[in-house]
Image (spheres, rainbow, N blue to C red):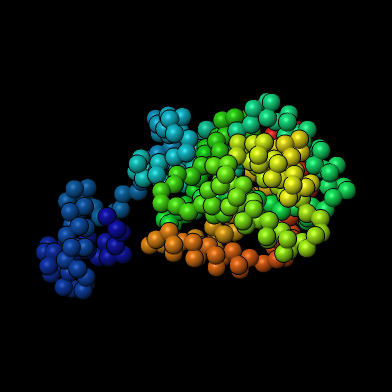
Amino acid sequence: MKSSPHRPSIELLFKRGLGSAEIARRLQISSSTVRNVVAAIKKRGDASEVKKSGRPRSVNTRNTRAIIKKRIIRNDGLSLNRMASQLGIARSTVQSIVKNDLKLKSYKLRRGQYLSDKSRAMRLEKCRKLLQHFQVRRVSDVIWTDEKIFTIEPLPNRQNQRQLLSKDDSMSPKRRLAHTAFSRKVSWFGPVSRQPVYQKIVLMDNLLPWVTQHFAGGPFILQQDWAPSHGSRSTLAVLEAHFPGFLDKNLWPASSPDLNPMDFSVWGMLEGKIAGKVFATVDDLKAALEVAWASIDDGYLRRTVNSVKKRLRACVKARGSNFEI
C-alpha cells in the first residue's frame, strides 16, 4: 500500500470516534485512503507504515541459472529477450547470468565456409601464391565474378543471427556459420550450374562483349570459383581462348568467399539497398536490383577491390582459417 502523509491525522480522528466518511470529508482526501489506514490501525493497533527488512528477493537463483544453462546447451542461438520472456524475468537478469555466472558472450555467426585441415592448408598455399602474383599484376585488373540468390521476401537482419559461447569456444568448430533459407528467388547473373549455359550465356554472350568494350585490348584477369561447370575441359578451352591469364585452380582457393569482393562486400551492399522491401513478383525484384546495381559508387568499388591484398595477408596470418576484419 502506498504511503499517505495523512496517516497521523487519520489515526487521531479515528481514535476520537469519527467514521471513515467523516474523516475523508474533513481532510478532503479519498475514502479509500482512509479505509486502508483504518484497516491497518485495526490490524496492528496504529497507522505506522511497516518497513521491509533485508535485501529484496533475487531471481538470480541456483535454479534459474540451471534452467538458463540447460536451455543454452539445447539451443545456443536462443535470444536473451526470448529467454527472459519465457522465464518471466527481466532481460538484464538473464544477461547478468549469461555473462557473469555462465561466462558466455553473444557472438555473431561467422560468414564463411567450413574448412577442413586440408582446405586450410590449400588456402594458405594459394593465398601466398596470390600475394606473389599481385606483386607483378594489378588487383584492379581482376574481373571478380560470383552468383547470388535474392528472395522477394524481406531479408533477415544478420545482426540477429547470434550464438552464445565461451571465449575459448568462440574460435573453435563450435562457432557456426551463417546460412540463409530461400523461397521465391532470383539468381543474380543467372544460373550457372549447367556447363553449356555457363560457357555460352555467361562467358561468350555476356562477359566477353563486356570485356571487349571496357578493356579495349588491355590486360585483365578473370576470377571465378571452381564449381564443376567452371573447371570442365571444354570450359577451360573457352577460358584459354578468350580469357587468357585467368586465375586457375592453382591460384584461386576453393571455399573462399572472404577473399572475393563480391562475396565479402558487394552482395551485402546490394542487400542493404533493397532491405525492408517486399516485392510482389520476381520481375519487381530484378528491376530493383538493376537500379541498386547501377547506383553503386565507383569509389566504393575501388576501395573494396584494394582491400583484397589485406585479406590475403590476413588469411596467411590465420594459417588458411576463416578470419574476420
Q: Could you tell whether 310 is left or right of 268 in the image?
A: right
140 over 170 or under it: above or below:
below
Quadrant containing the N terminus is bottom left
User: What residue is rendered at 16% in x and 66% in y?
Assistant: 31
Depth check, front residue: 323 or 100: 323
The spot of residue 136 in percent (x, y) is 88, 48
Q: Residue furthest right?
A: 136
User: What residue is rendered at 61% in x and 68% in y?
Assistant: 295
Can residue 4 be seen in the rendering of this structure? yes
42 over 176 or under it: above or below:
below
The spot of residue 34 in percent (x, y) is 19, 63
Depth check, front residue: 118 or 166: 118
The spot of residue 53 in percent (x, y) is 38, 43
Q: Residue furthest top?
A: 117
Q: How many discs appear?
A: 0
The spot of residue 139 in percent (x, y) is 79, 52
288 over 147 or under it: above or below:
below
Q: Could you tell whether 36 is left or right of 270 in the image?
A: left
Can residue 93 be seen in the rendering of this structure? no
232 over 220 or under it: above or below:
above
Depth check, front residue: 267 or 163: 267
User: What residue is rendered at 76% in x and 38% in y?
Assistant: 251
Q: Could you tell whether 111 is left or right of 280 in the image?
A: right
User: What residue is rendered at 21% in x and 74% in y?
Assistant: 28
Q: Find residue 87 and report its image quarter.
A: top left
